[in-house]
Image (cartoon, rainbow, N blue to C red):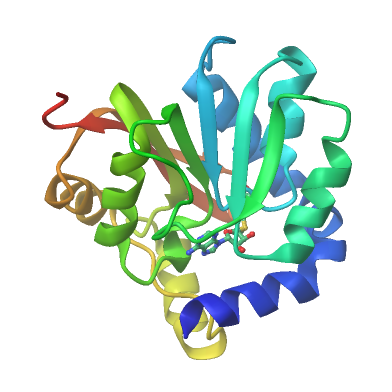
Amino acid sequence: MIETTVRDQYNQMAERYDRRWSRYLSNTLSFLKDWAAIVPESTVLDIGCGTGEFERLVLLEQPSQHIIGVDLSEGMLELAQQKCRGYPHVSFQKASVVALPFVDRSFDIIVSASAFHYFADPIAALKEMQRVLKPNGEIVILDWCKDYIMCQLYDVVLKRVDPAYRQSYTQAEFHRLLAQAGLVVDRAQKVRFGLAWELMIATARTDTPL
Ligand SMILES: C[S@@+](CC[C@H](N)C(=O)[O-])C[C@H]1O[C@@H](n2cnc3c(N)ncnc32)[C@H](O)[C@@H]1O
């Protein structure tokens, strides 16, 4: 089961994660924060929140922001909880993207950074995100982009050596998945951080808000 493998891998890596990926995290998550432009009134869900670095960045500017982070890894969640202790409107829960423990239409914004390439069933994941999204809410996903040569290389290697890894997508494939799940892309961009990291971001809305 891929989710167990992901959980175990991140539980093992949790203590080293922030240090190992410090530059990547500061680049990608600052970019995501600026792109998402979260207003203080909105209720935010972060899927695959990891060690809560995105929450920490948002809270530096907006300490009363309502955010819930979910992740498969107890180790990552424990660090996120420690990091954001003292902020009453932030909480973390263990949950899979395909079984979110929230009622329908709970969130104004759903974000997910560098986690989509782990999702075993991306359409089911996107549909579950849509279920908990308020009408006219936004889903913002940032992940690796297989239009680029480095990402194509990582994709080939990781499929061989990393049992937790599922796959990366080209931007066209990613947008097709969003459409198949009933989402419409509002805004999208590809973005590079140095020579090694090539990502894409999309803001999507539900096709037929009720
Ligand atoms: C590369 S880390 C990114 C963490 C954080 N978003 C960041 O940018 O630092 C990927 C995270 O996604 C989580 N994850 C992977 N598959 C998941 C799933 N199906 N449901 C929930 N979380 C998942 C992993 O446990 C891990 O913490």
Where residue 54 appears, as percent x and y from the top left, is 67, 36
- Residues 44 and 28: in front is 44
Q: Furthest residue to the front?
A: 103
Seen at 53% across and 52% down, the residue is 114
Seen at 73% across and 64% down, the residue is 74
**Image height of 157 relative to 178, above or below:** below
To which quarter of the image does residue 133 belong? top left
Seen at 36% across and 60% down, the residue is 146
**Image height of 42 relative to 77, above or below:** above
Res 26 visible: no
Seen at 79% across and 19% down, the residue is 60
- Residues 68 and 140: in front is 68
Where residue 105 appears, as percent x and y from the top left, is 34, 31
Res 64 visible: yes
**Image height of 56 relative to 125, above or below:** above
Left-right relation of 157 to 189: right
Q: Quadrant of the C terminus?
A: top left
Q: Furthest residue to the bottom?
A: 160
Q: Quadrant of ligand 1?
A: bottom right
Where residue 89 appears, as percent x and y from the top left, is 71, 24
Where residue 82 appears, as percent x and y from the top left, is 88, 44
Q: How many marks?
A: 0
